[in-house]
Amino acid sequence: MPSDNIEDLAVYIHWPYCTRICPYCDFNVYKDRQDNDLHRAICADLLHWRQWSGPRRVRSIHFGGGTPSLLSGPQISLFVKHVSSLWQLADNCEVALEANPNDANEAQWRAYNLAGVNRVSLGVQTFQDKGLKLLGRDHDSAQAKAALRLAKDIFPKVSADLIYGWAGQDEFMLRQDLEALLAYDIGHISAYQLTIEDGTSFANAQSRGDIKSVDADISADFYDLVRGTLKGAGFSHYEVSNFTKEGGASQHNLAYWQGRDYVGVGPGAHGRMTLDADRYASIAALKPADYITRIETEKMGIESETILTPQAWGEEYVIMGLRIKDGISMSRYEDITGKALPQNVINILIGDGMLIQDNGRLMASAQGRLVLNKITEMLLISD
């Protein structure tokens, strides 16, 4: 079995409900409702995963969605306790929850913290009310700032999401957003370029000529501005869209990028499990009702399960791993696939300033991160 800390698990719990579905979102989400059957189904699914994985150590628990901040403190506590009853939690286990600024409630957030949540990720997106309206958000700038203040007071680690490249945004607005966010002295910032995903409301609007994003050249300039500003403020650009101060990196997302195993429960959740040198890729049933029915009839929520071929596993490891500053272990790639990456192609990309090779690891340069799709295509097609 390939090593690289693969014995540790990350646990992802997907809560699929939102009070409002953002027009740019292509996640598996549904209009908000109370769903006690889903709580029970997720707990039963976690039990199936424990039977599948065997005894392992859990390094992170992540509540995503959807909007998991619609859950109550006792509900979050139930899930955390259930995970801890099934697996051993690492001493520094990260328990993270995604939240919207308009869900900020001191009593509820303190209940989350008592339940074990030690990291919160706030969907700020922008401090420009004009931008928030375009993005379909149900909070305003004042609510975002109040939520950041409250989160800083309650949780040991706070992260905030920004979206840049929306139609009407200019460099001055982006600078304002970055300066406003830096004033809160948080340890982690995720800055995402607005992309128009097929099947979303924004995609439909753009097909009618209603443009929702800036052009590619402006977006590239914005990326440079974000990177330069945050690095200048002491942040490490440790992943394509993520910046951290010392100790602030998302342990849960690192599981994806480093190719470690992760449990995925809840409607539409993806998972990866390595057993007896095989790498399993799973997807849970998408619709909440279908997911619950599968739990009742099959005792598990997984609807699709595939054993990845060594080639597919290796491709996933490269595609995800080159996103992070530390890159990939070339020997681990060989362990997975039984062959080496093409050194002649690596040398060309190093010469072009796109890749860095050091001490058995392969990393994308800052310039290379801008064209990762091209780099991985060259490496993997030539392989």
Image (tube, grey):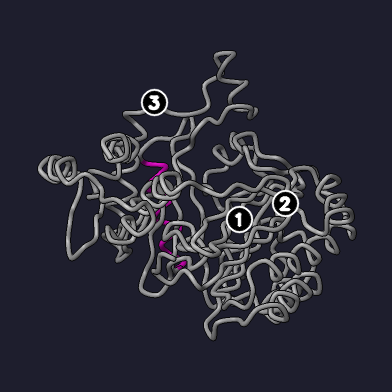
- Report which residue position mark 3 lands on: 215
Q: CA distance from mark 2 to mark 3?
A: 39 Å
Which of label 3 and label 1 is nearer to you? 1
The magenta segment is 172-186
| Closest to the observer, 98 or 348 | 348
Residue 233 is tagged as: none
- Report which residue position mark 1 lands on: 271
The image quarter in which residue 48 lies: bottom right
Q: CA distance from mark 1 to mark 2?
A: 9 Å
Label 2 residue SS = strand
The amino acid sitting under disc 3 is Asp
| Closest to the observer, 274 or 152 | 274
- Identity of the residue drawn at 56% across and 49% down: 307
Which of label 2 and label 3 is nearer to you? 2
Percent position (x, y) of residue 44? 81, 65
Residue 302 is tagged as: 2
Percent position (x, y) of residue 379? 27, 40
